[in-house]
Image: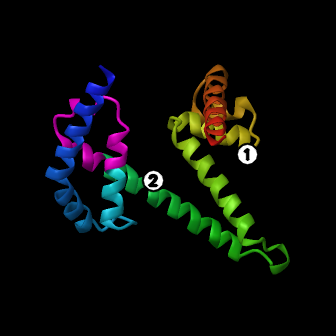
Amino acid sequence: MISASLSHSHSFMDRVFRDHHGWLTRWLSRQRWTVHSAEDVASDVFLVMLGMPHITAVREPRAMMTTIARRLIYDARRRNDLQRAYEAELANLPEAMDISAEDRLIVLQALQAIEAMLATLSPKARAAFVMSQIEGARHADVAKALNVSVSMVRKYLVQGMRAAYLAGASQE
């Protein structure tokens, strides 16, 4: 039963690839906001689709592909923006405080992991987590700033801690 389902998914993805790969690559090459080559993004789109559980239920493959492509491009641009900001801050450091290229990469990867974890939270949960855990604000001050109750701040912080734990567990 499972092998029949996999075979059906495989033939579906084979057909989708043959029918839409050229279109997707051309569409991506016309986009000014992409940060990688159209071929690379198209390949990543199909990899994401291969990992989707009920892919054969997709009725509009082009809509699915453009949605996935936009998300991949958004994530890549966000990572690039974070890297540029980090490198700009490093450029402002005095020479005595300069760090090695290996340490820079480690810090950059940690920042990207933190940024990805924060992106999984709702805007208020993200703000509460950052204000409390990064800026050191008290729960009452966070509640006032977000116009929510202190108990809601605690719930947001639990969401943030859970997301941080899951992000750390997935890194292992």
Left or right: 140 in relation to 122: right
Disc with the residue nearer the chain's start (2 vs 1): 2
The quadrant holding residue 100 is bottom right
The answer to if 128 sits in the magenta stretch is: no
Give x and y (percent) for residue 48: 37, 44
Q: Specify the label residue 75 is tagged with.
A: 2
Count the marks: 2
**Which is in the foreground here, disc 2 or disc 1?**
2
Mark 1 Cα-neighbour bin, 10 Å: few <14, some 14–19, many ≥20: few
Going 60% across and 66% down the picture, which residue do you hit?
Answer: 85
Left or right: 122 in relation to 92: left
Please name the residue that numbered disc 1 is placed on.
135
Q: Is residue 152 above or below residue 129?
A: above
Left or right: 79 in relation to 31: right
Residue type for callout 2: Asp
The quadrant holding residue 96 is bottom right
Q: Secondary structure at mark 1?
A: loop
Going 41% across and 54% down the picture, which residue do you hit?
Answer: 74
Residue type for callout 1: Glu
Mark 2 Cα-neighbour bin, 10 Å: few <14, some 14–19, many ≥20: some
Q: What residue span does the magenta drawing correspond to? A: 46-67
Going 56% across and 61% down the picture, which residue do you hit?
Answer: 82
Looking at the picture, tell me which residue is in the foreground, 100 or 119.
Answer: 100
Going 70% across and 59% down the picture, which residue do you hit?
Answer: 106
Give x and y (percent) for residue 134: 72, 45
Looking at the picture, tell me which residue is in the foreground, 158 or 162.
Answer: 162
